């Protein structure tokens, strides 16, 4: 069946550091891929998405590229801010959405 | 603010009881989804309704049921509650029925505690 694996957290970075959160997937068919973010005490918000191979999703300085050959959708940001502290979920959608376990990110000043 | 509302925000109840969680989707959205988020299971898709009809089913227990009403709000009913049902329950909505095509907007969640 379809599944999503993402790097275990928590991840702690200093402000302005480079961020990578790894995400790999297993899927039959041609799923869409998403990154969602959950700030403390809130529901999930869509951060970015990609619907086909080689698409790059980007938003608020975050970006991820749909890599079919490596079945990956890694999230990157060049310079993180304290306000980026949250839990990040990688997800794939085919007949239904499957979320990864989430990666908690803390950014310290 | 996503435009999706959920009530109540918190719910504390005893084992064996039954509760109803309510969700109102964003204006114009026809699909409603229910998710359960717990520390050990992560975020699990439970069920989707589209325009009043069940569209997709995930890991929903037989003790749980849902429906979507003509005004498009949805209710999730949880019965014979067990300690393990304690979790955050999220509702989400989207415009269309196909999960791979339409962005889902999440509500703030209902935190259920079963004692």
Image: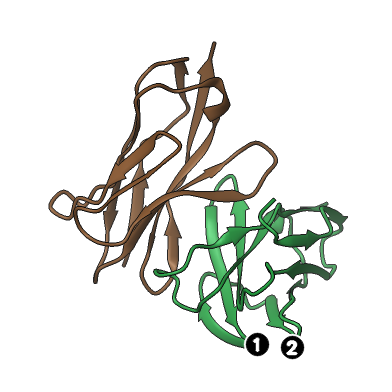
Chain colours: A brown, B green
Label 1: which residue? B52
Task: Name the residue located 69 percent from the left edge and 75 percent from the top edge.
Answer: B63
Q: Distance between the residues labelled 1 and 2?
A: 6 Å
Please tell me which residue lies in front, A57 or B58.
A57
Left or right for B30, reference A9: right
Going by the picture, which residue comes out furthest to the left?
A: A69
* Residue A33 image position (x, y, % from top left): 35, 56
Task: Name the residue located 77 percent from the left edge and 72 percent from the top edge.
Answer: B79
The mark tally for this picture is 2
Secondary element under disc 2, as helix, strand or loop, is loop
Task: Name the residue located 65 percent from the left edge and 87 percent from the top edge.
Answer: B52
Residue A97 in the image: above or below residue A83:
below
Which chain is mark 2 on?
Answer: B
Q: Which quadrant holds residue B8?
A: bottom right
Left or right for A52, reference A46: left
* Residue B60 image position (x, y, % from top left): 58, 72
Left or right for A39, reference A6: right
Whether tag 1 and tag 2 are in contact, CB under 8 A, the answer is yes
- Going from N to C along the chain, the mark reached first, 1 or 2, is 1
Q: Which quadrant holds residue B6?
A: bottom right
Going by the picture, which residue comes out furthest to the top?
A: A109
* Residue A32 image position (x, y, % from top left): 33, 62
Task: Name the residue located 16 percent from the left edge and 48 percent from the top edge.
Answer: A70
Left or right for A52, reference A63: left
* Residue A21's disc number: none
Which chain is mark 1 on?
Answer: B
Label 2: which residue? B70
Within-10-Å neighbours for mark 1: few <14, some 14–19, many 20+: some
């Amino acid at each position: 069946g379809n599944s999503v694996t993402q790097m275990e957290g928590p991840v702690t970075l200093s402000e302005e550091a480079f961020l990578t959160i790894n995400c790999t997937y297993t899927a039959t068919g041609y799923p869409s891929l998403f990154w969602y973010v959950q700030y403390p005490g809130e529901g999930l918000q869509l951060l970015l998405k990609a619907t086909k191979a080689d698409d790059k999703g980007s938003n608020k300085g975050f970006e991820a590229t749909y890599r079919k050959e490596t079945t990956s959708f890694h999230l990157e940001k060049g310079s993180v801010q304290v306000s980026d502290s949250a839990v990040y979920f990688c997800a794939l959608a085919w007949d239904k959405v499957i979320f990864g376990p989430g990666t908690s990110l803390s950014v310290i000043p | 603010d996503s435009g999706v509302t959920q009530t109540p925000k918190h719910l504390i109840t005893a084992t064996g009881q039954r509760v109803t969680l309510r969700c109102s989707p964003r204006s114009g959205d026809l699909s409603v989804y229910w998710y359960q988020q717990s520390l050990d299971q992560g975020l699990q898709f439970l069920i989707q309704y589209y325009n009043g009809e069940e569209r997709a089913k995930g890991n929903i227990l037989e003790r749980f049921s849902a429906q979507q009403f003509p005004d498009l709000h949805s209710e999730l009913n949880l019965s014979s509650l067990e300690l393990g049902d304690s979790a955050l329950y999220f509702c989400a909505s989207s415009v269309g029925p196909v999960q791979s095509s339409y962005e889902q907007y999440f509500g703030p969640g209902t935190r259920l505690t079963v004692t």
